[in-house]
């Protein structure tokens, strides 16, 4: 096998060395490979990045600004970089395949980057999954395409009370492969070529590529930070929508607005007044609201999560997205759902039945049992939806105190798994961290922190649109939904860091 690989390599090298200047790369490769047509669909152009990980051995991507007609010829003769069409091996406007996860595995780090609990789901949920695996053998087979009936029924009953709606489990509920699947299905079903989609930033990073893949155009509106007094920690509640700016984003081409409350990465819980503003503009301009509410049970400090679909006139134009993974601390189960009026969900069902068709039955059965448990205990001390935020609040406060010890300034989140921390002091004291000059500062800081301090986080600038990233490259995101042992390991790293800061 190795001899064959070596022979192919030598053959290709010989072709490239013997070819005359200007020879097309396609022509060069055609002498060995039969397939020279474009492989990927054009809808993937510009969105084929992964901000979480670059797998070991993956090639370093080259960003091309505007490829000339003879692009292949220029590349083959190594003239492309000289022509100015390739700007850099790190193009911050396109290249965000940052190696944070790989780096975290290569160094001795405490991984506080990606958002998943490192503690088990509640016992009743684990037992429900075990029962689904071992009881009824028919749970190994297909169930209804749009959701396992006991699950759609309990979701209709449970959320119907919260939203003040009579929810039909057949018409108003769609079970998907995680909330991610619900989002993708919604964009594919409802966003058409040329439609505008308003995205509030900072935003969960899939909203923009999902809009683009559907042929839509993202339109961004940025939360504005109100000033705080000197020495006072910032709060996510200080990041607010500007009513005038938001209203200016609505046009005759606006099809949808994406709302994420509680917000990832900021941890903001949108107030009733803010939701009423969004609702008013959506109704005024006949716009759909895609409301991502996966962190709805993780709200702290007396704040209240409000589903925008519960506001007057909004049920008929809102898709409410939920997640069993976030609800029951079981992100690997990948069970999500979309709730909404039949006039919207029927189009999601069309996409669903022609893509994945069906979600794994046993996971749905376990989630159905888990929701039945929560419905019986709802609002009581025995409810997981009461216990989880109480436990996570302690972890949040632990992390906030610890990060401050080395000069990081956390923004206190009202909800979600995450907080962002201001690194402005570091940016002013050590502005020239290693890395490409065009690489955002927060990205270089995270790499420095992984290598030198043993802590992994995510740069917050990846949650912004390209034009705004340079204004928000002084924040990094941490996940605090972690086991006590993980937080103690974090403290040990921070204590060493603190010792190094002493004169």
Image: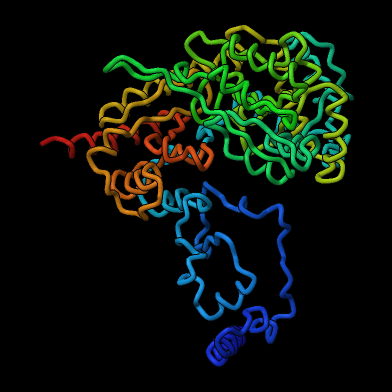
- Residue 151: x and y in percent read 80, 25
- Residue 459: x and y in percent read 43, 40
Q: Residue at x 45, y 57 (%)?
A: 90
Relative to 95, say whether 242 is above or below: above
Residue 22 visible in rendering = yes
Judged left or right of residue 491, residue 131 is right
Q: How is the image coloured?
A: rainbow
Q: Judge by depth and name the residue closer to the eye, 119 or 226.
A: 226
Which quadrant would residue 334 be assigned to in this image? top right
Looking at this view, name the residue that lies furthest to the bottom.
18
Q: Residue at x 51, y 24 (%)?
A: 223
Q: Judge by depth and name the residue closer to the eye, 32 or 45.
A: 45
Relative to 394, say whether 208 is above or below: below
Judged left or right of residue 187, residue 46 is left
How many dots with numbers? 0
Location of the C terminus by quadrant is top left
Location of the N terminus by quadrant is bottom right
Residue 366 visible in rendering = no
Q: Judge by depth and name the residue closer to the eye, 299 or 76.
A: 76
- Residue 55: x and y in percent read 53, 57
Q: Residue at x 47, y 70 (%)?
A: 81
- Residue 462: x and y in percent read 50, 41
Relative to 7, say whether 215 is above or below: above
Q: Judge by depth and name the residue closer to the eye, 56 or 29.
A: 29
């Amino acid at each position: 096998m190795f001899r064959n690989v070596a022979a192919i390599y030598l053959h290709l090298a010989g072709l490239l060395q013997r070819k005359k200047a200007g020879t097309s790369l396609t022509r060069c490769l055609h002498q060995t490979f039969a397939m020279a047509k474009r492989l990927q669909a054009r809808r993937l152009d510009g969105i084929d990045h992964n901000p979480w990980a670059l797998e070991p051995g993956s090639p370093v991507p080259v960003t091309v600004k505007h490829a000339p007609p003879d692009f292949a010829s220029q590349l083959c003769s190594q003239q492309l970089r000289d022509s100015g069409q390739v700007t850099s091996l790190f193009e911050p406007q396109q290249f965000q395949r940052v190696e944070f996860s790989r780096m975290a595995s290569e160094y001795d780090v405490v991984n506080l980057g990606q958002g998943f609990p490192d503690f088990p789901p509640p016992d009743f949920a684990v037992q429900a999954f075990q029962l689904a695996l071992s009881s009824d053998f028919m749970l190994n087979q297909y169930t209804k395409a749009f959701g396992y009936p006991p699950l759609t029924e309990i979701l209709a009953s449970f959320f119907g009370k919260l939203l003040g709606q009579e929810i039909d489990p057949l018409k108003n509920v769609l079970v998907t492969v995680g909330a991610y699947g619900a989002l993708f299905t919604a964009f594919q079903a409802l966003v058409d070529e040329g439609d505008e989609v308003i995205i509030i930033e900072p935003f969960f990073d899939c909203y923009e590529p999902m809009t683009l893949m559907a042929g839509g155009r993202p339109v961004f509106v940025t939360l504005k930070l109100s000033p705080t007094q000197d020495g006072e920690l910032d709060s996510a509640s200080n990041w607010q929508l500007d009513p005038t700016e938001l209203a200016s984003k609505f046009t005759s081409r606006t099809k949808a607005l994406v709302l994420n409350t509680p917000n990832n990465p900021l941890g903001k819980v949108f107030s009733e007044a803010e939701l009423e503003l969004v609702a008013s503009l959506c109704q005024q301009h006949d716009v759909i609201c895609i409301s991502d509410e996966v962190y709805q049970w993780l709200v702290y400090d007396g704040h209240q999560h409000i589903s925008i679909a519960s506001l007057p006139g909004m049920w008929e134009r809102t898709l409410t997205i939920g997640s069993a993974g976030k609800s029951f601390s079981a992100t690997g189960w990948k069970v999500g759902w979309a709730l909404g009026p039949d006039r919207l969900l029927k189009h999601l069902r069309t996409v669903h039945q022609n893509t994945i068709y069906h979600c794994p039955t046993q996971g749905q059965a376990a989630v159905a049992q888990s929701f039945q448990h929560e419905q019986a205990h709802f609002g009581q001390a025995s409810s997981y939806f009461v216990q989880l935020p109480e436990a996570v609040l302690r972890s949040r406060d632990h992390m906030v105190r610890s990060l401050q010890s080395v000069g990081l300034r956390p923004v206190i989140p009202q909800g979600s798994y995450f907080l962002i921390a201001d690194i402005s002091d570091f940016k002013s004291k050590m502005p020239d961290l290693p890395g490409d000059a065009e690489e955002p500062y927060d990205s270089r800081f995270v790499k420095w922190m992984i290598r030198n301090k043993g802590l992994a986080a995510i740069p917050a600038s990846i949650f912004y649109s390209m034009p705004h990233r340079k204004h928000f490259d002084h924040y990094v995101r941490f996940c605090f939904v972690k086991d006590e042992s993980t937080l103690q390991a974090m403290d040990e790293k921070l204590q060493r860091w603190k010792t190094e800061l002493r004169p």
